Each structure stands twice: as structure tokens, then as C-alpha cells.
Image (cartoon, rainbow, N blue to C red):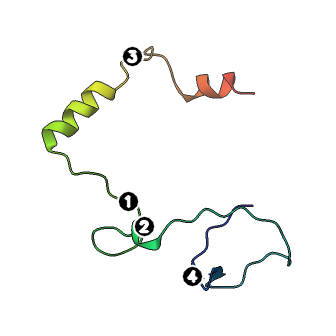
Amino acid sequence: MAIQIDAIYQDGVLRPSAPLDRPDSTPVIVTVTPAVALQGADGNRGCQRGRRITVDEFRRIMKDCTIKAPPLPPDWDRHDVYSDHD
């Protein structure tokens, strides 16, 4: 089971901020991402923000990336989905 933890890099060693629920000598894979890179513009941790785009750019992206599909038949309902499942 993968978990995400906070840690401090100190004297050449990563030190978790809290104890891990793992037995000693358990092999793990570590991905290091500086905490500063995880902070939003307001300083809180969360999703990284991409470059800002204008409303017109957003509309163009939505138009270009929207999948065009025919409408569902008028008599279609959720029972059609459930009947085809399993």
C-alpha cells in the first residue's frame, strides 16, 4: 500500500516527520519532491498551479478537446447500462 509522508532531509538521511507503519528493514521506493514545489500561490500545500490562461484560451481548449458524440437514443436509461454490466 502506497502512502505519502512528510520528511526532512538532514545529514544525508531522510527523516519522516511521523513514525511509519512499517517493520524495520522494509524495502521501500522513495520519490523526493521538495515541499516548496507543492505549495500553491497562497503558500498552502495542494495542487500545483499551471500557467494562467485567459477566458478565451480556456474556451478554445474546451472546444478543441471536447469529444463530439451523437446523442443517446430517446428511450435510453440507466437500466440499459446495468443490463449490459457483468
Residue 33 x/y as whole percent: 51, 65
The residue pinned by badge 1 equals 48
Question: Of marks 3 and 1, which one's residue comes earlier in the chain?
Answer: 1
The residue pinned by badge 3 equals 71
Q: Count how many numbered circles sit on residues in the image.
A: 4
- Describe the element under mark 2 as helix, strand or loop: helix
The residue pinned by badge 4 equals 8
CA separation in Å, label 2 and label 3:
41 Å
User: Could you say which is closer to the camera, residue 11 or residue 55?
Assistant: 11
Question: Of marks 4 and 2, which one's residue comes earlier in the chain?
Answer: 4
- 60 horizontally vs 6: left or right: left
Residue 27 x/y as whole percent: 81, 66
The residue pinned by badge 2 equals 38
**Residues at discs 2 and 1 in contact (Cβ within 8 Å):** yes
Question: Of marks 2 and 3, which one's residue comes earlier in the chain?
Answer: 2
Point out the frontmost of discs 4 and 2: 4
Residue 42 x/y as whole percent: 28, 73
Q: Which mark is residue 24?
A: none
Q: Is residue 71 above or below residue 79?
A: above
CA separation in Å, label 4 and label 2:
15 Å
The amino acid pointed to by label 3 is Pro
- Describe the element under mark 1 as helix, strand or loop: loop
- Describe the element under mark 3 as helix, strand or loop: loop
CA separation in Å, label 4 and label 1:
21 Å
Disc 1: CA contacts within 10 A as few (<14), some (14-19) or many (>=20): few
The amino acid pointed to by label 1 is Gln
State which quarter of the image contains the N terminus: bottom right
Image quadrant assignment for residue 54: top left
**Residues at discs 3 and 1 in contact (Cβ within 8 Å):** no
**Residues at discs 4 and 2 in contact (Cβ within 8 Å):** no
- Describe the element under mark 4 as helix, strand or loop: strand
